[in-house]
Image (cartoon, rainbow, N blue to C red):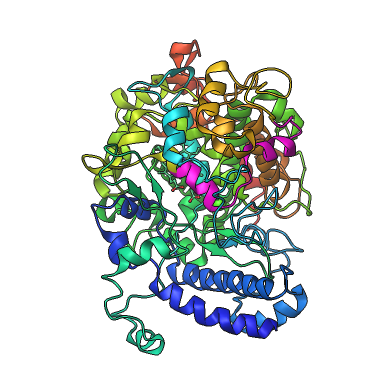
Amino acid sequence: DIEQAINSALEIVTIRRFASIPRPVIKDPANPVSLRGALARRRENPEIVAKYGLAADLVETATVLFAERHGGKLPNAEAFRAAIAPYCPTKIAKCENNCRYRSADGSCNNRIHPEWGTTFSPQTRFLPPDYGDQFDIGVVPRSTSVTGHKLPSPREISNSVHDAGMTAPRDHIYNINLMHFGLVIFHDVISTPLRQALARRRENPDIVAKYGLAADLVETATVLFAERPACFPFFTLPGEFSHTCRSFVRSEIAPSQGCLPGPSNQMNQKTSYLDLSLIYGNSIEGEQRFRQFGSEGEQRFRQFGPGHPDSFDATLNIFHVIFLRENNKILRDLKHLGWSGDSLFKETRNIMSAIYQHIVYTEYVPAVIGQDAMLRYGLKSTRYGHNTMYNPKSDATTSNVFATAAIRFAHSTFDTFEKDVIQGFSPETFQNYSNIVTNSPSSSTLFTRFQSKTDRFMTDFGRNKLWESEPKNSVDTMSFDIQRGRDHGLPSYNRWREYCGLKPILHFGKGIMGFADHTIGATKALSSVYRHPDDIDLISGAMTERPVSGGIVGPTFACLLGEQFALFKTGDRFFYENDFYPTGFTKGQLRQIKKQSLSSVMCRHVNIPAVPQNAFISPKAGEPLVPCMTFPKLDLREWALHGRD
Ligand code: HEM
Ligand SMILES: [Ca+2]
């Protein structure tokens, strides 16, 4: 029976994968989806994404076929695993026993589960998914209200709850560095590819012939678009955008280790660990490309841009430029100390990742979730010395709810300033970043300019003008965030409140069992668009909460961010504070790393005489300016004494 289900699924999936989202639709410059396509483009290994996606689709389809024939029962896991084995990609070869350094793709970080946190993993779940299909497998996204009606259109929610008008409130403390550093973390730990056709008709005439697909397949794309499981369009009011029907492509899914049957989980094409894989690559090939070209990184970008097959995976970002410069500096210094070859590169990455993790846990996360949550989730780094919190049972794989909702709180913090720097992924844009970083007048803006306040509001730019290719042809980030949550089957806001130990909201009032964490304005906005409190999408419910004390997000996101950052720490055998031999740092080395801060790093590479003590706080908010000369240099002498090669 299982074999029968798998065979039928194989046939369905091959046709569907071939036919879904023909490339012309993705490439069409007039279609905003093409631009989202640029964001979620398949990065270092598009063939592997396709292979894993196909396998996951096969698992999903076979699971559903079996469940339909067996009154909703799922197939036996072991029997299913055996039957699907010929189609299930295996990932991990063998782990070296005494490897001192991280692997390029995150494998072997956890010794018992070497696949945890690796590139192409399925995103993990803190709560089981709530999809729209009968068996909660994922064939249909979450789309129905508990009242039986359809859920409101994401654009309707965006309009009622998240519209800031022309100017969104500004933060009074945090500058735009905070938003930009968040982007680094985001691109380090998550990238969800979109579903895509396996091959073009022209390139694959055999498949066309075999399955008798219509020759005008590509031309009929628009008709097929709405019918396929890859598509999940939503509607906007007439006049708002050029089309009332907004195309939306669902995320790619990934199989579990062994392709076990069960609900679908979306793919992550990054390593989950905080290992700066956005710079160094997420695969052996990606890392090799970096090593080949990395030292000339900046010039390389200018020449080719990050999209070029010759350039490594990149995020255009102010900090990308700064980190490349810091990488090259450490590389030079270690070389002087006698390091060479493989260990020169690997130790440089090791030090870079350590400084970066130190900034994440002592500067970024506390600013976002506040000191209480830092304590509650065990996130505080110690001032001096080691602090081993590693737990081999912690799975650091980036979770679905973190990527699809919690860390996207930051979508409320960007502003029109970004217009100049994110319009595309081109060498010119990179040049722009490079100039901003280097030239004093604009680099001081990084520190002084307040970011948009973290609240329920998104700027006009983010909600109405993003990637505008022609008038009214643009993306509403908020609508996409809401729709993406439904695509991924994220349970509704109330379920996450329960998960976090907060009381679910039972009615649209303020009083007991009502909206305790929301302002009256937010409560009104939510009740004007949702039929029932149980329908509220997580991102909308959480972004409307009042911030926790000392943080910028509300209690639900503080909890979900806190849990994920705890896993990034306790689930990383190479976490910078771990006292492990031979992978950890010595006490002396750690002392040097812990003297560093984002401001000290920025001082080394930004042409500016003084910076705020805390790089995320604007001097206009009273943060003292400190002359760059007084920040501790990165002293690598400890690496000479204890150099291991
Ligand atoms: C420069 C300003 C930014 C713009 C214009 C922007 C816009 C977008 C858009 C349009 C999407 C796709 C939505 C979807 O289809 O699901 C997206 C995804 C995402 N954004 Fe942003 N964003 C910005 C900054 C940030 C920041 C600062 C963070 C985090 C601190 C962040 C985190 C994310 C995450 C995690 C995703 C999902 C990525 C994936 O799973 O592949 N974004 N963003
Ligand atoms: Ca990573």
2 sits left or right of 408 in the view: right
Q: Is residue 91 visible?
A: no
Ligand 1 shows up in the quarter that is top left
Q: Residue furthest left?
A: 470
Residue shown at 38% from the left, 31% from the top: 606
Q: Is-magenta flag for residue 487?
A: yes
360 sits left or right of 278 in the view: right
Secondary structure predominantly adopted by residues drawn in magenta? helix
Compared to residue 370, the image places residue 309 above or below, namely below
Q: Nearer the viewer, residue 322 or 551?
A: 551
Residue shown at 65% from the left, 24% from the top: 370
Task: Say which quadrant the C terminus sits in.
Answer: bottom right
Q: Is residue 397 visible?
A: yes
Task: Say which quadrant the N terminus sits in.
Answer: bottom right
Residue shown at 57% from the left, 39% from the top: 537
Residue 183, x across and y down, in percent: 47, 40
Magenta span of residues: 480-504
